[in-house]
Image (cartoon, grey):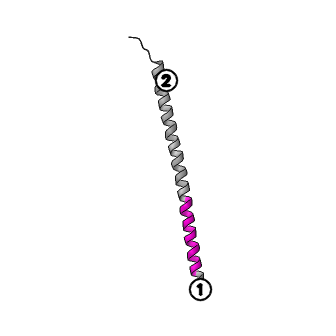
Amino acid sequence: MSEVYNVASLRGLLMLLADFCRFIAVLVNNAFKTVQQSAKDKEDICRRANARQRYLTQDFTL
């Protein structure tokens, strides 16, 4: 009976560990996506600022 209990408790601990690992993986994945989106946003801001600067400094002579 004690062996069955040990196997059941071990299985429960392994399931808990698997759930914890999935939780950590989701957190890491979300953090990566946030950093990636921030980098894209920064590139977009720089691209728009560069385009605005080119427009403001272009020669308007006809």
Residue drawn 48% across and 18% down? 57
Magenta extent: 7-24
Dot 2 lies on which element?
Answer: helix
Residue 33 x/y as whole percent: 51, 49
Which residue, given by chain and number where applicable, does mark 1 sit on? 3
Q: Is residue 56 above or below residue 11?
A: above
Could you give the CA–CA distance between mark 2 and mark 1, rounded to whole angstroms?
A: 75 Å
* Residue at the far left in the pictured view: 62
The numbered mark at residue 56 is none
- Amino acid type indicated by mark 2: Gln
12 drawn magenta? yes
Residue at (55, 50) in percent of width and height: 31
Q: Kindly identify which residue carries mark 2.
A: 53
| Residue 51 in the image: above or below residue 39 | above
Mark 1 surroundings: few (<14), some (14-19) or many (≥20) residues within 10 A:
few
Residue at 42 percent of width and 14 percent of height: 60
Query: The N terminus is located in which quarter?
Result: bottom right
Dominant secondary structure, magenta: helix
| Quarter-of-image position of residue 3 | bottom right
Residue at the far bottom: name it: 1
Q: At x 55% / y 66%, what residue is drawn? A: 19
> Quick one: label 2 or label 1, which is nearer the N terminus?
1
> From what the image shows, is residue 41 above or below residue 23?
above
The residue type indicated by label 1 comes to: Glu
Residue 17: x %, y % from top left: 57, 68
Task: Give the side of residue 35 with respect to residue 61, left or right.
Answer: right
Q: Is residue 17 above or below residue 60?
A: below
Residue 6 rendering spot, x and y as whole percentages? 60, 81
Residue 55: x, y in percent?
Answer: 45, 22
Crowd rating for badge 2 (residues with CA inside 10 Å; few <14, some 14–19, many 20+): few
Element under disc 1 = helix
